Amino acid sequence: MSKKIYLDNAATTKVRKEVVEEMIKYFDEFYGNPSSQLYELGRKSKEAIEKSRKTIADFINADEKEFYFTGGGSESDNWAIKGVAFANMKKGKHIITTKIEHHAILHTCEYLEKFGFETTYLDVDQYGMIDLEQLKVSIRPDTILISIMYANNEIGTIQPIEQIGEIAHEHGIIFHTDAVQAMGAVKIDVKKQHIDLMSMSAHKVGGPKGIGGMYIRKGVKIDNFIHGGGQERGKRAGTEGVQNIVGFGKAVELINKNFDKHVEALTLKRNKLIEGIKSNIEDVILNGHPTMRLPNNVNFSYKYVEGESILLLLDMEGIAASSGSACTSGSLDPSHVLLATGLDHGTAHGSIRFTLSEEITDEDIEFVVETMKSIIEKLRKISPLNKNNAM
Ligand SMILES: *Cc1c(COP(=O)(O)O)cnc(C)c1O
């Protein structure tokens, strides 16, 4: 087998070694139930949880009491939407979100329609940006929640979060943002950016799967999510996944250490890959915003070819990436995000997302560009969609 080049870090990331080392202790050494406060083993677990909570809260400029552990990004999104909807339904039943949200947001909004809630889905432009004017005119007297993702997982576009937060607060509306992709890639300050609720996930930032977090600004009206014991201040019951919480905290600690350098290095690599593809392959479209984009996201559409075929050939070369329909695996519906940016179905189908990590070397990038060049040439020669092929 040739060298593996993993370029699907938006799907998940490798768990950092230091994270694993820290986690292991909480399986066999400090295995006490954090609710068992009458002996040391229990207290150790509780202390570990609170240490992680402080690390993560500090990282986003929140108070520790405003940060809650959840079962992942999807759970946090569900909690934010349902929790605000049911707690504020006497005030109104209107929610504003966008057409490019993660399915954890979109499907939750759809579910709420059963209970009489209405959702406005904001458009985005060709770069995946929302229009603040459209946001303003969409606000109604019964609007209770604005949920707009910080950065998009497919095309990497970063929204003007602070301005959105200001607009929400001028109207007394709760503002939630799904920051699962943004965390670790952009500087987040929940206070300065007027964020009331924010979803996070550990496995997108070098931590373990199945653990996430939610920032809930003090005073925000939101229902408890899991009813049971008193864990997470009674809002999210269930014995804490201590080892996962410890892993999440450690992952954030590591990101925080070299934040600016890390982002700078990733951005250079990203730009190198974008330039390499642009200058070596014809008829490509860069999806997402040219500058307001995640430092590790490269998403192109390649005309006249199918994303799935590209992925198969990339896999044969040891390269892992993702296509414009990977999120709904098994289904051939093109990505709702790419369609929202105005791409037609055919072009959307020929899209490939590369999401880099710091482990990717310049040589890897050159290899990926060369490989893509030959794959696209090969596929275009046999493509019935290619107008240059005589039928
Ligand atoms: C991955 C992702 C989620 C879901 O997070 P999980 O922890 O996998 O449930 C939600 N939103 C965005 C933007 C994501 O990229």
Image (spheres, grey):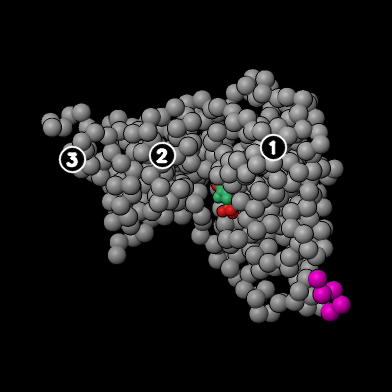
Which of marks 3 and 2 precedes in the sequence? 2
Callout 3: helix, strand or loop?
helix
What residue does disc 2 label? 334
**Residue 222, percent from left and from top:** 78, 45
Callout 1: helix, strand or loop?
loop
Asked whether 273 or 215 is in front, the reply is 215
What residue does disc 1 label? 116
In the rendering, which numbered label is found on residue 146? none
Magenta stretch: give its range. Answer: 35-39
| Mark 2 → mark 1, Cα distance in angstroms | 29 Å
Asked whether 10 or 88 is in front, the reply is 88
Callout 2: helix, strand or loop?
loop
- Which SS does the magenta portion mostly show? loop
Residue 131 lies left or right of residue 146; in this view the side is left
What residue does disc 3 label? 382
| Mark 1 → mark 3, Cα distance in angstroms | 50 Å
